[in-house]
Each structure stands twice: as structure tokens, then as C-alpha cells.
Image (cartoon, rainbow, N blue to C red):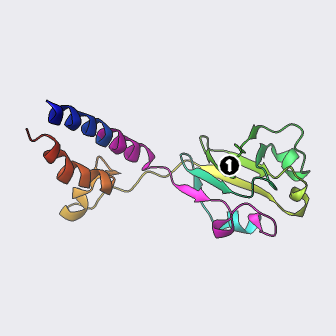
Amino acid sequence: GLRMKLGGQVMVIVWAAAVMLMCTADGRRIDVGGKVGWTQAVNYTLWASQQTFYVGDWLFFRFDKNAYDVLEVNQTNYEHCNADHFITNITRGSGRDLLELKEAKPYYFICSKGYCYGGMKLAINVTEPTPPSPAPQGNHASSLFQSGGKSVNFPVLVVAIFVLPFLFKV
């Protein structure tokens, strides 16, 4: 009846949430500029030198949408603050925009509203993530959270252990 129907819908929602958590477990969200975000008077060269960027990570640009934008450009246009032939307009209008780093390569970003000349530009080098080292033999606690050398997302494990059994009660 109704309980089975609702249980099935909840199961689908839980399953979808678990898949989303597992799919995003490898990539990290990196807040460009840290707490201050994408704005003027930030040394993005220094900020980027203190970060490591991997394929699968997500850059999160947080900025005043009325004052700034974010364009991906090539190296020459980055160096000259030229927005005429940008690669991608990251700006989606919200001032809270994400970009997935899909390739191991250098990426270049500028603000095209004149602030690039004052340093509002970012150059990063994205590399392939290094594979995790295997868990040491005999360490049963860590092997509980390892599966084929890949970490199991803890919230997914909690859902699997504690929530799923209750959904299948008739």
C-alpha cells in the first residue's frame, strides 16, 4: 500500500543521494581566494601557489555579480588582460559559480571589467591526482573504510548501515 509506495520513493531518494556523494567524493571544492573570494586587492598568484589543483576538483568563484565576472582565457590573453577571445565565461549570473577542472593542464582566469590590470587574475596548473597508497596489512580499522584502494565516503557508509534496513521493513 501507501507505506510501500512511500518507502520506495524514499529508497530512490536515498540511493540518488548516496550516488551523488560517491561521485563527488574524489573532487574537492576549492574556494578561489579563500574567505575573501574573487575580488580586488587579493594576490591570486600567492594564493594559487599555496594550493594544489587536481583533475576532478571544482573551483568555486564567489564574487559581487554586479562588479565582477570570471572568464577562462589562454596564457597570452591572461598576460595581457585581454577578454576579447575568452575560452569560457564562467559567470552564470549568481556570483557563486563553479567550474570543474576536467583536464590536467594550466588554466587561466581573468576579470574582464578592468580589474585584471590590478591583479584580479588567476593562473593554476592542474595535475592528475596521485593514486592513494594501499592500506597497511593488518590494519583492520582502516580496511573497514577502504574498498579496492579507494576510500568509502563515510556518510554513504552511515546511510547503508543505519537507514537502509529501516526502509525494507514491511
Q: Residue furthest front?
A: 2
Residue placed under numbered mark 1 in the picture = 94
Type of the residue with mark 1: Ser
Residue 77 lies in what quarter of the image?
Answer: top right
> Going 30% across and 50% down the picture, which residue do you hit?
156
Residue 158 lies in what quarter of the image?
Answer: bottom left
Badge 1: residue crowd in 10 Å (few <14, some 14–19, many ≥20): few
Label 1: which secondary element:
loop
Q: Nearer the viewer, residue 42 or 75?
A: 42
Q: Which residues are magenta?
A: 15-44
- Is 97 situated left or right of 6 in this image? right
For the N terminus, give its image quadrant. top left
- Residue 119, position as x, y percentages in the image: 84, 62
Whether 118 is among the magenta residues is no
- Is 111 situated left or right of 96 in this image? right
- Residue 37, position as x, y percentages in the image: 69, 63
> Going 66% across and 60% down the picture, which residue do you hit?
32
Is residue 138 visible from the viewing direction of this image? no
Q: Nearer the viewer, residue 136 or 24?
A: 24
- Residue 134, position as x, y percentages in the image: 32, 55
- Residue 70, position as x, y percentages in the image: 76, 49
Q: Nearer the viewer, residue 145 or 14?
A: 14
Q: Note whether 148 is above or below 132 in the view shown.
A: above
For the C terminus, give its image quadrant. top left
- Is 86 situated left or right of 128 in this image? right
Whether 28 is among the magenta residues is yes
